[in-house]
Image (cartoon, helix red, strand yellow):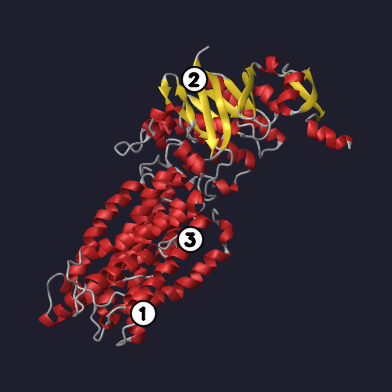
Amino acid sequence: MDKAVTVTALTVAYGAATALSAIDLGIPKGKVTVLAGPNGCGKSTLLRAIRRLHQPKSGEIRLGDLPISGLKEKELARHIGLLAQNPSAPGDMTVEELVRLGRYPHQTMLQPWSAADGEAIQAAMFGTGVSHLNDRRLGSLSGGQLQRVWIAMVLAQETDIICLDEPVNHLDMAHQIDCLDLVRRLNREHGRTVVLVLHDLNLAARYADRLVFLKGGSVVAEGEPVELMSEVLIEDVFGISCRVITDPVHERPLCIPIRNSTPRFRAETAA
Amino acid sequence: MSLVLPRSSALARLNRRAWIAVAIIAAAAMAIALCGIGFGSTWIDPRRIVEILLGDGSRGERVVVLQLRAPRVAIAILAGGAMAVSGYLLQKVTRNELASPGVLGVIGGAGLGVVIFLALLSDESNALVTSIVWQPVAAMIGASIAIAAVFLLSGQQASSAVRLLLFGIAVGAVCKAGTLILMIVGPIYRTTQASRWLAGAVNEINWGEVQVVAIGLAIAMVGVFTVARRLPPTDLDEVSARGIGLNLPVFRILVFALASALTALAVAFAGGVGFVGLMAPHLARLIVGRPVIPGIVASFLLGAIMLVGADLIVRVLFAPTEVPAGTVTAVIGTPYFLYLVLRRGSTNG
């Protein structure tokens, strides 16, 4: 399996607290990988570490053969695009202006603007279906539209790898599906490697080619959704007893939570 | 970001509109500068001023215009412009319209730097024992120490604009107090200049001082236009800005240093003129909108207009008493600041 990103013995700490301990992980090229786990498991930290937003205490992250620690800020931004968890931009900025910012890592002092930039912006806006919003101010967009515009910005960056940190958190169900369908289409049609952090286990199982379960700062299991979505493993990682059935529409595993099964919680409800 | 945009895009239109606004502001700046030179014990017609500036006029006229009035207006243009650009940069990288050299303590630091410098290096006759070139350097040292202190105090949360502003106000107040103490306990001959270091004024300026500021400003503006290209990503949150390849924490320090240098140049001879660095960039953004280069140019021009205008007002109202121009900017600026605080809902905390 060809790896887009290889994480080796990665440890990340916030002060004294260890957020990730000795993680080994490969992100397959051209696939959608979803990082999942309960709150505080370190999934967002891992995603941010891959984008070098956290300085690792030890260990290494490589893009192909390149260690990311040796890359310049703009070089890294030409390899990995990132949609932040709570991105923000001024409300009076226009859609086109924001998408243009995706070209920032490709621009230099001597070549501030090229035809390639224009094409990438057009393609990104067309691909995300926001071309018609071109001149609109960000403040006038709906949540779903805004998220598409942010994805267009990341897309205009033309990176091989795209990281998205909980991209559907603030969206209603229709826009969640809309957004993730879009992400998967970008993966299938453009061959981009996608790394997603998702809260919702069923969305994770539905969209992942490869699923990674984290708990307490460690990778507990990784594999295809059908392998990972077992009742025993889910109970161990997420602390819920559940039934797993096959979604009759998409033929993906579907988890039906029954009850919180963490010992403390059980003790409280028994008393 | 590039000025070469695809035709018919709204962005191109916005950019064009911005430059037209800049041209109008430039014309207004020119007009008020001529008024600034024209007004005095005798009124000199603007057309006559242009002729004198171009080499015409009697000896008397030339002395009044070139030696007495022009340097005063020139320093007001340069100092007001420098502070405004400084404020533009600070507002941009902190994503907060309340940020300005005054609020962040930079003016206070620069002022204290100059006053200490003057106290240490003046002789009994109130003359500097060293070159005036060192005066902006002293201001820069003071400004840098102040902004560094604000940064260190804000610590881990230096990216939170609110904390920066709170510590900035505190550091500024300490510097102001230090300046005041030096004014009071310093040798008596220095109190003639007290108004300048306490409020900011542009009287008693000579060409040598204008020259020092002009050269320093030319160098600083090269730096400003170099960083201007990297300013657009600073509109985004820190994670998104880094995502597209701008290391915001590092870049912010660079911009803060540049903004301090600009403020120091202004304070070095014009003193601590308040609120120009707050109001001018804010108005510039209202008038020209978001494009960066027109925004910087408009800030400079509006800053110049404000300080020349403030000086004109004190001369019209209080002549022959010399009231520092900084009192006018403070009187207008304070309510403006309060207005911005009250409508803070629209800013990024």
Tell me which corner region of the image, top left, top right, bottom left or bottom right, holds residue A78.
top left
Disc 2 versus disc 3: distance between alpha carbons? 45 Å
User: Which residue does the numbered mark 3 point to in the structure image?
Assistant: B167
Chain name for mark 1: B
**What SS does tag 1 mark?**
helix
Disc 1 marks a residue whose amino acid type is Ile
Q: Nearer the viewer, mark 3 or mark 1?
A: 3
Judged from the image, the secondary structure of the residue bearing numbered disc 2 is strand
| Proximity of marks 2 and 1: CB atoms separated by less than 8 Å | no
Which badge, 3 or 1, comes first in the chain's sequence?
Answer: 3
**Which image quarter holds the C terminus of chain A?**
top right
How far apart marks 2 and 1 lie (CA) works out to: 66 Å
Instruction: Pinpoint residue A18: horizontal percent, then vertical percent.
Output: 57, 34
Query: CA–CA distance between discs 3 and 1?
Result: 33 Å
Circle 2 or circle 1, nearest the eye: 2
User: x, y percentage for residue B46?
Assistant: 24, 76
| Kind of residue sitting beneath label 2 | Ala
Front one among A249 and A7: A7
Q: Which residue is mark 2?
A: A4
Disc 1 target residue: B313
